[in-house]
Structure formats: structure tokens, C-alpha cells
Image: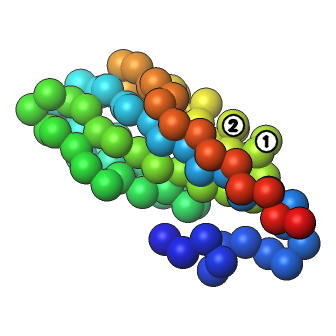
């Protein structure tokens, strides 16, 4: 996903977060579908047997990004969500 294609000219910041999402292995397909329905969300890798996936979310609105991260916890089958990376790019 290209940062410049997603930001607007008026955006002050661009945030990228990396999450590890653990879910019930039998619910992995549904969890992936729900995650990919969230705008600017990618799943670079996952282990279906372990029920774990790496999720990357991006946004120029930190409040929207926080809401999106919180919504992951509400997806049926999700057991745990851990923030493992956050980067903020300040556009000046």
C-alpha cells in the first residue's frame, strides 16, 4: 500500500501500526474477511494452525486508526490483539 496514494494534501500526520491478532483457528477465515473490510488494513502473514496473524493498519487520522484497532477486539473469534509497532510520519 502506497502512503502517497492514501494521504490527502491537507494531512498533517500518517500513522502505521502493526498488530498481532490471535484468534480461534476455526474462525481464521472469518476474522481475515472482517479485518480486510477495514479500510487501509493488510494481513502480510498468518498462521492458521496457530490462530495468529500480523495485521498492518494505516491512517492519516489517529482517532480513526484507534477506533479501527479497537474494533478488531470485537470481531467474533478474536482472542487477543497486541500492538507491536507504531510509526508516525509528520508531513510538514
* Marker count (numbered): 2
* Residue 82 left/right relative to 29: right
Residue 89 x, y percent position in the rendering: 71, 56
Q: Residue at x 38, y 32 (%)?
A: 20
* Residue 80 left/right relative to 88: left
Of 40 and 11, nearer the camera is 11
Extreme front residue here? 92
Q: Which mark is residue 63?
A: 1
Q: Is residue 63 above or below residue 44?
A: above
Q: Verify CB contact (< 8 Å) between mark 2 and mark 1.
A: yes
Extreme top residue here? 79
* Residue 61 left/right relative to 22: right
Residue 92 x, y percent position in the rendering: 89, 66
Label 2 CA crowd tier, 10 Å (few <14, some 14–19, many 20+): few
Q: Which mark is residue 66?
A: 2
Q: Residue at x 29, y 39 (%)?
A: 53
Alpha carbon separation for disc pair 2 and 1: 5 Å
Amino acid at each position: 500500500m502506497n502512503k502517497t496514494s492514501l494521504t490527502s494534501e491537507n494531512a498533517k500526520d500518517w500513522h502505521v501500526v502493526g498488530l498481532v491478532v490471535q484468534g480461534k483457528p476455526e474462525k481464521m477465515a472469518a476474522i481475515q474477511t472482517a479485518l480486510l473490510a477495514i479500510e487501509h488494513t493488510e494481513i502480510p502473514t498468518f498462521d492458521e494452525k496457530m490462530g495468529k496473524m500480523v495485521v498492518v493498519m494505516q491512517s492519516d487520522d489517529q482517532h480513526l486508526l484507534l477506533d479501527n484497532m479497537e474494533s478488531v477486539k470485537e470481531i467474533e473469534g478474536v482472542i487477543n490483539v497486541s500492538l507491536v509497532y507504531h510509526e508516525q510520519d509528520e508531513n510538514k
